[in-house]
Image (cartoon, rainbow, N blue to C red):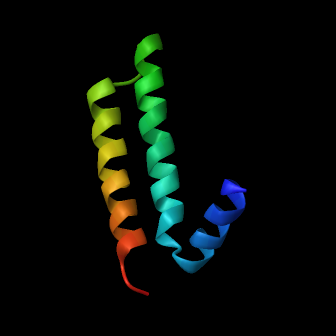
Amino acid sequence: MLAKRWRTLERQRPQLRYVKWGEAIGVLFILGRFVGLGSVVFGLILMAGFGLWGYSVLNRES
């Protein structure tokens, strides 16, 4: 149900596609830290930044 609503929101606001990918890359940086290929701080900064951008996209009047 949530995935269907997200796809509808992505069609209405295409910027959310970039938010989703930015959040995923942030998670990869955090998880990559445990195998020595990432940075927790950079991952958290990415996730927070893309999260704030997504929040502003969702709250923008269409």
* Horizontal relation, residue 42 to residue 25: left or right: left
Q: Residue furthest bottom?
A: 62
Residue at 41 percent of width and 38 percent of height: 26
Q: Is residue 45 left or right of residue 22?
A: left
* Quadrant of image for the C terminus: bottom left
Tell me if residue 8 comes above or below residue 42 in the rendering.
below
Seen from this angle, which residue lies furthest front? Answer: 1
Q: How many marks?
A: 0
Task: Assign the N terminus to one quadrant of the image.
Answer: bottom right
Residue 58 on image: x %, y %: 42, 70
Q: Residue 25's spot in the image, x, y percent?
A: 47, 41
On screen, residue 34 above or below 61: above
For this rendering, which residue is in front, 59 or 37? 59
Closer to us: 10 or 31: 10
Q: Quadrant of residue 60?
A: bottom left
Residue 23 x/y as whole percent: 45, 46
Q: Residue at x 36, y 53 (%)?
A: 50
Q: Residue 30, position in %: x, y?
A: 41, 26
Which image quarter: residue 7? bottom right
Q: Between residues 57 and 46, which one lies in front from this camera angle? A: 57
Q: Residue at x 44, y 13 (%)?
A: 34
